[in-house]
Image (cartoon, grey):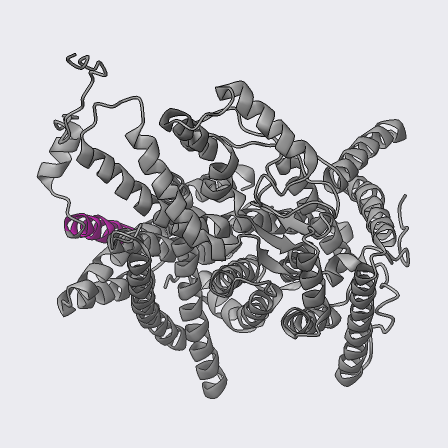
């Protein structure tokens, strides 16, 4: 179990980061205007026919206006809220990576390199080192490009089985093998005695639940947690096996590649996203972190307020035949609409067109849920983004002389980059690359903090001067 | 040394900041974003100041306390400049948010943004000042073995706490002064920041640095409280826990009079 994995190269999980960065909004914003009007009208009807009829007319008006401004506020807060919904997992992933780097020495120890980066960096001259790292980065990037193109070709020609097999094998590798190594190293660091049987049980449970959550159905939070964990594991592998200059070069080049792949008309990632949208399919759940869920099961409450607040930790959508979030109930697959109709009939009986029944129907889950619930309009971030953000921050904490200052500066830079990217996403409303801005800020802050800020702060701290 | 000093100093330095963040900022997404944005602006100012110091050291060829003094003064001025830039950006954002919202009021007021951005400047400044020191304090060592003060960690923690609070207060005062275009407020903020930084140059003579800095913190706090609209009267009202009569009348009768036949 000890010094394995010199060249035990993970060939397969590379497509994780080759599918790097799409950041996209599944909200169909063109409908949002209409939906908001529908909303306010519905509420007006609701209030007019509500039970507490003692309210005077202007109160209803006020409530309606307040609801409308709440909707507007909700749209804005929705923007801010979804930024936070991405801040939290990105921060968690980075915290896990930095904590591991700082405590488990295995991931900072040099134990060879990946076969994708065959040139060593232990050379005599600086020029040779630079050349080697450029070559390494070039090889790595071409591998990533080839894999992405392969993935897009497979997707275009509907070879779903191959893609699924590929994804399943790579998540198997990550969930079982890499987490086994990680667990082993953590035990070694803290000098915990452990037997193989217990470890086997733990890894088996961890891996199987992970496979189920990621590829099939599972609670949203658990799926998100697993995605964060495999991103962290992948990032740790990169931090361990990529030599320094190569790592920084790869980060720079991959953000340029990301920009090109997502924005250029013939870019592979853009073609992938467009094909998926044409066919109305979700992209592979194993490669995308999603901040919300598709609502399959109806909520028990009738009140739209309660629906919005109570979280339905329901089930993930199955494979490619399913729809993206907030589609209409009617257009969803079979079981859903029948179930919905059954529930509706159970609740209010067969519908007649009286004002009361209209109000009751309008108060029911179906459309109002899909249009009012802001949590349904989710933002998705590719796992490759998680991985490369964590690689940047992890490398900063592993190798910087400024230590915590550099790590924190890179962390803030990445968060600000993510915030700006989400702002652009809100403006342009199409899939955007999430790597360029964050990685640029991160790299600038890393080198600036490490070389300029660190000596300055060091001197100040030495004399206990504060600025 | 060890865990006790680490946790103690961390709690002293970041206790108030953590409480403020948890109670007032963490629940609101917009405020969290303003917090991160403020930290970014402070980092930019620090980058610029370090660049200046680095260049001056390379040019003069030596590294001594005089250059450090100049570097620190430049850092203070650049921080205030970045605070101004932050103000400009937040004001624009405020106008944008107000334009986007239906009733013309943005979901976050400029005063709240002033407070949060001041807090963010304070937190990031404190974090950069003390995190490496805290990391060292958790490990083995003897403080002041070469004749320096043995109270290094605890005084650093207290100074950091004062700085965090000061930045919060300065943020409030600064934004208010910019909003009302009063140069006096601006000048006083810059002046007191320079004074604080200058006082720390008297370390390790802690009587002359800690006491005046804490008095300055208190005064600035009172001034910021007044600027934000507080007063002795408000405090009394809050403490006496008197509930104001509601402006709206609640109708609690849901019974309807049956319509006359």
Screen quadrant of the C terminus of chain A: bottom left
Asked if residue A360 lies left or right of residue B178, the reply is: right
Q: Nearer the viewer, residue B173 or A290?
A: A290
Above or below, A332 relative to B170: above
In-image side of A461 versus B188 (left or right):
right
Where is residue A177 shown, x and y percent of the image? 85, 44
Q: Is residue B84 magenta?
A: no
Residue B220 shown in magenta: yes
* Residue drawn at point x = 54 percent, y = 72 percent: A448
Query: For the view shown, which residue lies furthest in the left direction?
Result: B233
Q: The magenta stretch spans which residues?
A: B210-226
Where residue B1 appears, x then y in whole percent?
Answer: 54, 42
- Residue at the location (52% across, 63% down)? A421
**Residue B155 appears in view:** no
Task: Locate the N terminus of chain A by quadrant.
Answer: top right
Label total for image: 0
Residue A284 in the image: state x and y as whole percent. 73, 51
**Left-right relation of B110 to A221:** left
Where is residue A278? Give x, y as percent: 68, 59
């Amino acid at each position: 179990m000890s010094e394995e994995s010199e060249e035990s190269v993970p060939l397969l999980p590379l497509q994780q980061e080759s599918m790097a960065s799409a950041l996209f909004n599944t909200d169909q914003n063109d409908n949002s205007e209409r939906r908001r009007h529908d909303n306010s009208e519905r509420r007006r009807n609701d209030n007019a026919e509500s039970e507490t009829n003692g309210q005077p007319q202007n109160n209803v008006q006020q409530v309606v206006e307040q609801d409308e401004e709440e909707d507007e506020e909700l749209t804005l807060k929705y923007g801010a809220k979804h930024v936070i919904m991405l801040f939290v997992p990105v921060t968690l992933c980075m915290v896990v990576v930095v904590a591991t780097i700082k405590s488990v020495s295995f991931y900072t120890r040099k134990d060879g390199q990946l076969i994708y980066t065959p040139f060593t960096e232990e050379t005599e001259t600086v020029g040779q080192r630079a050349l080697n790292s450029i070559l390494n980065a070039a090889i790595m990037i071409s591998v990533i490009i080839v894999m992405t193109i392969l993935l897009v070709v497979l997707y275009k020609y509907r070879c779903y089985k191959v893609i699924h097999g590929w994804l399943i094998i790579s998540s198997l590798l990550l969930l079982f093998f890499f987490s086994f190594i990680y667990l082993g190293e953590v035990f070694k660091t803290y000098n915990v005695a452990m037997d193989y049987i217990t470890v086997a049980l733990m890894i088996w449970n961890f891996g199987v639940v992970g496979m189920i959550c990621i590829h099939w159905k599972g609670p949203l939070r658990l799926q998100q947690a697993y995605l964060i964990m495999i991103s962290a594991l992948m990032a740790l592998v990169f931090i361990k096996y990529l030599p320094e200059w190569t790592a920084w070069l790869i980060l720079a080049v991959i953000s340029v590649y990301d920009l090109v792949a997502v924005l250029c008309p013939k870019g592979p990632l853009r073609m992938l996203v467009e094909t998926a949208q044409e066919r109305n399919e979700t992209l592979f759940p194993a490669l995308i972190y999603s901040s919300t869920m598709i609502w399959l099961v109806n909520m028990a409450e009738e009140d739209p307020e309660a629906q919005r607040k109570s979280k339905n930790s329901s089930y993930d959508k199955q494979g490619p035949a399913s729809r993206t979030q907030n589609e209409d109930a009617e257009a969803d697959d079979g079981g859903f609409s029948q179930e919905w109709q059954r529930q509706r009939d159970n609740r209010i009986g067969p519908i007649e067109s009286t004002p009361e029944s209209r109000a009751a129907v309008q108060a029911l889950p179906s459309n109002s849920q899909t249009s009012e619930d802001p949590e349904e309009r989710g933002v998705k971030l590719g796992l490759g983004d998680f991985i490369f953000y964590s690689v940047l921050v992890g490398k900063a904490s592993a190798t910087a002389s400024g230590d915590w200052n550099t790590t924190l500066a890179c962390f803030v830079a990445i968060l600000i980059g993510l915030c700006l990217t989400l702002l652009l996403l809100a403006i342009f409303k199409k899939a955007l690359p999430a790597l360029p801005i964050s990685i640029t800020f991160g790299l600038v802050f890393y080198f600036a903090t490490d070389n300029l800020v660190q000596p300055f702060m060091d001197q100040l701290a030495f004399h206990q001067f504060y600025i | 040394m060890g865990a006790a000093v680490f946790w103690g100093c961390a709690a002293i330095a970041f206790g108030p900041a953590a409480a403020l963040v948890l109670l007032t900022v963490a629940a609101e997404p917009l405020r969290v974003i303003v917090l991160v944005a403020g930290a970014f602006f402070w980092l930019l100012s620090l980058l610029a100041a370090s660049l200046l110091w680095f260049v001056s050291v390379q040019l003069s060829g030596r590294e001594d306390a005089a250059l450090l003094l100049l570097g620190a003064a430049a850092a203070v001025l650049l921080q205030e400049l970045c605070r101004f830039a932050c103000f400009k950006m937040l004001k624009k954002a405020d106008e944008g948010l107000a334009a986007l919202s239906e009733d013309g009021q943005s979901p976050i007021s400029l005063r709240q943004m002033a407070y949060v951005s001041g807090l963010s400047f304070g937190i990031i400044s404190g974090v950069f000042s003390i995190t490496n020191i805290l990391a060292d304090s958790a490990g083995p060592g003897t403080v002041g073995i070469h004749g320096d003060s043995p109270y290094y960690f605890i005084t650093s923690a207290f100074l950091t706490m004062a700085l965090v609070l000061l930045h919060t207060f300065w943020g409030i005062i600064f934004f208010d002064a910019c909003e009302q275009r009063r140069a006096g407020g601006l000048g006083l903020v810059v002046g007191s920041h320079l004074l604080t930084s200058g006082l720390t140059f008297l370390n390790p003579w802690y009587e002359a640095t800690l006491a005046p800095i804490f008095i300055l913190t208190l005064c600035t706090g009172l001034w910021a409280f007044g600027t934000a609209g507080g007063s002795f009267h408000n405090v009394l009202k809050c403490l006496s826990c008197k509930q104001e009569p509601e402006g709206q009348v609640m109708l609690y009768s849901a019974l309807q009079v049956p319509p006359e036949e």
